[in-house]
């Protein structure tokens, strides 16, 4: 110790470390404030990134031991995977990318708890509260890791997006898994040192993460990702208490709080309660009924052609475009922008009606349309748009389904009853671009398609929109 | 006694950080929710620090080291990937004229 140079000992002093951490917190908070406005958001994100760099460097400076090789290896591996993934992901695949990044965060949390358990031979010689927070982090981190991976799989369509559940037994199974995981945790906190119990706890939590997300239908997915994001934040904060590290506590808790707010906002936008989503998703009875009852509709569906749609649009005064996940999947945002330009050249007033949960995450449509250079002031949020539909000649629904379903207003038995929707049927006519008559992600039949003012243009969103644009040139 | 006061200090930090999270974030407009989720997602990658701290302690077995390297790699993916993706998303908003008509900040990054 006496051989340590003065500079090093100053760098390793804990008050210097605390000062760096405090600077990092300030940057995190400033960065998040920046994220609250479109003009400051880029800088906000970078400020937060600088805060993170300072927190990491401060931690590295303060370490006592070697093992630098392992640290370099870990960081190099993470960078080698993370950077290309983030650079190359398509804008349309953003939601599942966020789910995946969130998942690995949860993975890191439970692995850290596990190593802490192993290092202390089952929390021997540590305070009970440290064991409790570490175990909490392990359970929640594991749930978040597996849940996020399932969410990723569903959005990436590796796993079917429709709800998969054990039916009425689901809640009992979930509850049982939770009880088992907590019981194992309590056992360890009370003094059991067996690693078998710890691994059993991790497995129960992993199964719980699977069991919670599998039954959730696609429309609820944004809420779930947000909830898991909050979970990972909370588990990081718990890790912080277990390791007595204020940086983890502050950053983790801020994320926990923000994730909770976002989750609530999203759930409110869909008129859903978070417990209801977790307990059963859109799945269960409603979706099954909807699927089997597809033939029951007395109304007929009228299909149209791109040429007819082009004529309808060209002679409209005002057109409202309602984008949804179909536009994202087909990468149709640039084609939509072309169509918009073409219509505007003809003096048609074009607006975009953005439902808060259109696509897979709040703001998903905004991101895509911004990528295609659609001006901000053309985007209208739901309340604003709903006042406009009355004076809209043609609503062009591009790959949006559940967010336009009048059943949410008219059919109390519908699983989405009460969810605010875009009231496209108030406009004089509606053109729906859709690949087939299959019900949407929530698995519910859409009455809109059977209404007399609605015509369907079947096809891939990008191809169909391009075709309309091409037809416009002939008019 | 000392342990108890560490716990209460940390709990106080926890509660205050929670309030800051609520206050700062409740002001974010709808349109920025996806980037915000992505940005906060990057911030919880701070668990990386936990891996850095534990890997430095003595007494880690080979298996522990494997777990910790994976944890550090996971944390790094979370941080680096999260901030980069958020940056990419936000770049798209940046040069667009805003509804409010403020176009003075038409700055283009290389």
Image: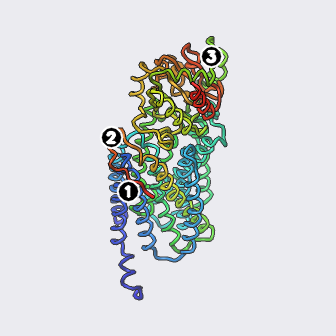
- Graded by Cα atoms within 10 Å as few (under 14), some (14 to 19) or many (20 or more), the crowding at tag 3 reads some
The residue under the point 55% across, 47% down is: A99
Query: Between tags 3 and 2, which lies in front?
Result: 2
Residue extending furthest bottom?
Answer: A3
Q: Secondary structure at mark 2?
A: loop
Q: Secondary structure at mark 1?
A: helix
Query: Between tags 3 and 1, which lies in front?
Result: 3
Alpha carbon separation for disc pair 3 and 1:
54 Å
The reply to whether label 3 and label 2 mark residues of one chain is no
Q: Earlier in the sequence, mark 3 or mark 1?
A: 1
Residue A272 in sight here: no
Q: Is residue B92 left or right of residue A305?
A: left
Q: Chain of mark 3?
A: A
Residue A177 drawn at (x, y percent): 58, 43
Find residue A319 and name its label. none
- In this view, the residue in front, A243 or A290, is A290
Q: Chain of mark 2?
A: B
Q: Secondary structure at mark 3?
A: loop
Looking at the image, is A9 positioned above or below residue A253?
below
Q: Chain of mark 1?
A: A
Q: Is residue A359 left or right of residue B3?
A: right
Residue A418 drawn at (x, y percent): 46, 23
The reply to whether label 3 and label 1 mark residues of one chain is yes
- Residue that label 1 marks: A28
- Graded by Cα atoms within 10 Å as few (under 14), some (14 to 19) or many (20 or more), the crowding at tag 1 reads many
Residue A86 drawn at (x, y percent): 55, 54
- Residue that label 3 marks: A302
The residue under the point 64% across, 34% down is: A166
- In this view, the residue in front, A471 or B11, is A471
Q: Is residue A319 left or right of residue A329?
A: left
Image quadrant holding the C terminus of chain A, namely: top right
- Residue that label 2 marks: B101
């Amino acid at each position: 110790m006496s051989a340590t140079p003065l500079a090093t000992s100053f760098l390793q002093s804990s008050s210097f470390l605390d000062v760096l951490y405090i600077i990092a917190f300030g940057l995190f908070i400033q960065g998040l404030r920046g994220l609250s406005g479109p003009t400051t958001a880029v800088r906000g994100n970078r400020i937060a990134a600088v805060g993170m760099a300072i927190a990491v460097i401060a931690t590295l400076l303060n370490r006592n031991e070697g093992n630098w090789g392992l640290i370099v290896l870990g960081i190099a591996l993470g960078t080698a995977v993370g950077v290309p993934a983030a650079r190359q992901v398509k804008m349309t695949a953003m939601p599942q990318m966020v789910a995946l990044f969130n998942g690995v965060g949860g993975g890191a949390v439970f692995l850290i708890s596990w190593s802490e358990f192993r290092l202390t031979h089952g929390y021997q010689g540590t305070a009970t509260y440290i064991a409790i927070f570490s175990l909490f982090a392990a359970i929640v981190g594991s749930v978040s890791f597996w849940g996020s991976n399932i969410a990723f799989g569903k959005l990436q369509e590796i796993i079917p997006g429709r709800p998969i559940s054990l039916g009425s037994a689901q809640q009992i199974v979930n509850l049982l898994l939770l009880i088992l995981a907590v019981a194992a945790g309590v056992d360890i906190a009370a003094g059991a040192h067996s690693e078998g119990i710890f691994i059993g706890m991790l497995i129960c939590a992993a199964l719980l993460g699977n069991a919670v997300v599998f039954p959730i239908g696609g429309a609820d997915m944004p809420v779930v990702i947000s909830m898991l994001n909050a979970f990972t934040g909370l588990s990081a904060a718990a890790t912080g208490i277990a390791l007595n590290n204020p940086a983890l506590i502050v950053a983790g808790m801020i994320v926990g709080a923000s994730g909770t707010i976002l989750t609530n906002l999203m759930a409110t936008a869909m008129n859903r309660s978070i417990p209801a989503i977790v307990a059963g998703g859109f799945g269960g009875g409603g979706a099954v009924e909807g699927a089997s009852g597809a033939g029951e509709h007395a109304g007929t569906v009228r299909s149209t052609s791109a040429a007819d749609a082009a004529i309808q649009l060209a002679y409209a005064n005002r057109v409202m475009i309602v984008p949804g996940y179909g536009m994202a999947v087909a990468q149709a945002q640039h084609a939509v922008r072309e169509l918009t330009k073409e219509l505007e050249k003809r003096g048609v007033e074009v607006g975009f009606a953005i439902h808060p949960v259109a696509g897979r995450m709040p703001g998903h449509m905004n991101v895509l349309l911004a990528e295609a250079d659609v001006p901000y002031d053309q985007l209208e949020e739901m309340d604003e748009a709903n006042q406009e539909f009355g004076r809209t000649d043609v609503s062009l629904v591009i790959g949006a389904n559940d967010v336009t379903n009048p059943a949410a207003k008219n059919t109390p038995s519908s699983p989405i009853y009460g969810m605010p929707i875009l009231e496209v049927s108030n406009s004089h006519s509606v053109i729906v671009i859709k690949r087939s008559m299959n019900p949407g992600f929530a698995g519910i039949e859409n009455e809109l398609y059977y209404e007399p003012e609605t015509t369907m243009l079947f096809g891939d969103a990008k191809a169909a929109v391009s075709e309309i644009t091409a037809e416009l040139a002939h008019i | 006694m000392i342990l108890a006061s560490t716990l209460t200090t940390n709990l106080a930090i926890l509660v205050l950080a929670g309030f800051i999270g609520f206050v700062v974030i409740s002001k974010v407009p709808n349109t920025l929710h996806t980037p915000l989720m992505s940005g906060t997602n990057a911030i919880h990658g701070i668990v990386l620090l936990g891996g850095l701290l534990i890997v430095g302690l003595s007494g880690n077995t080979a298996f522990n080291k494997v777990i910790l390297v994976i944890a550090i790699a996971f944390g790094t993916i979370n941080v680096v990937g999260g901030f980069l993706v958020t940056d990419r998303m936000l770049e798209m908003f940046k040069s667009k004229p805003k509804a409010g008509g403020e176009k003075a900040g038409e700055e283009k990054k290389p």
